[in-house]
Amino acid sequence: MGHLAVAGATGAVGQEICTLLEQRGIKPSHLTLLASARSAGSAVTVHGQRVPVLELTADAFTGVDYAIFSAGGDRSRDFAEAAVRAGAVVVDNSSAFRMSDGVPLVIPEVNPQDVCHHKGIIANPNCSTIIMNMAVWPLHRVNPVRRLIVSTYQAASGAGAAAMNELLTQSADVLAGREFTPKSFPHPCAFNLFSHNTPLGVDGYNTEERKMIDETHKIFHDESIAISATCVRVPVLRAHSESINISFDRPITPEEVRAILAGAAGVTIVDDAEAGRFPMPIDATGQDDVLVGRIRQDVSQPDGRGIEMFVSGDQLRKGAALNAIQIVELLAAS
């Protein structure tokens, strides 16, 4: 791999990227870590070497081949084009470019061929979109999906390191009977759940729900799939879960679904009815694979075309850092 830059290196996703570089044995010819002026001057250990963190500026990308951005949409909009002008291919984790024309939106297990059509920027999908479609796409290839209804159970990790810390401190405050003021979220996150804290559109869907709908259509290159989403924040530290109801073009059985998913890359079936063990965020945390279980026939669809399932996936890994690294690996191999 050539010269890699990571923008937002000290954030939750940036730290996970550095961890994955070690775990996957990826050694770029040069590694540049970038962050805000507040974090510049610190250092991160990667492959046993202390790598200094530099300030993210428009001039920071000289000689860079690949730049992974995990510093938020504003930073991506401010600096991604500068990285492209310097000769880098940008893999952006924010929502800044996901629905832009000419910007591929890529899950390597789903549409790896789309990386070839970039014009300097490739977008990483929303974490909930990735986790859902790791389980849905292998089925869609065999038996086209006609309708998806998904409800999410989204961990604090989706809002970054500060939100994760707030869940920990807030939980301690509640147990100790202390007063607290929510900061990362508009509502208490400890021992509570609430509708995903993104703005509502005129159709009543919030931004996170709309992302799952629109991004799936773009990734699948199929806008005919009917999709409805309800996204909820839950008091889980890390790893998102989702309840997914699928209507297929043709009848399909749970046994057929298990057989398809058993051979799908990036998926692990956890569906032990006898032991009562199914996907849980505590098991998905730190794992590359998305866990899939509770696979059963939807009894409300007597024609046999409906399947229910439950999935859990690590939002910081496959939902963000790992997916971005896999895209860079595709680019480097092409």
Image (cartoon, rainbow, N blue to C red):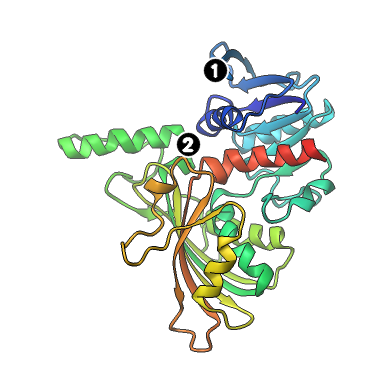
* Residue type of the residue flagged with mark 2: Gly
Element type at mark 1? strand
Where is residue 240 shown, x and y percent of the image?
A: 45, 50
Which residue extends farthest left?
177
Q: Is residue 199 left or right of residue 139?
A: left
Q: At 59% from the left edge and 53% from the top edge, which residue is drawn? A: 130
Q: Residue at x 63, y 43 (%)?
A: 323
Q: Is residue 237 left or right of residue 173?
A: right
Picture quarter with the N terminus: top right
The foreground one among 258 and 319 is: 258
User: x%, y% of residue 197?
Assistant: 45, 50
Residue 60's label in the rendered image is: none
Position of residue 250 relative to residue 183, above or below, is: below
Q: Earlier in the sequence, mark 2 or mark 1?
A: 1
Residue drawn at point x = 40 percent, y = 42 percent: 185
Q: What whole-number distance in Å separates the C-alpha atoms at marks 2 and 1? A: 18 Å
Secondary structure of the residue carrying tag 2 is loop
> What residue would you read off at disc 1?
44
Q: Mark 2 or mark 1: which is in front?
A: 1
Is residue 36 placed above or below 292 in the rendered structure? above
- In the image, residue 3 lies at what x, y percent? 75, 23
Q: Is residue 200 visible?
A: yes
User: So how many labels did they put on this image?
Assistant: 2
Residue for badge 2:
160
Task: Tell me, yes or no, if residue 231 can be seen here.
Answer: no
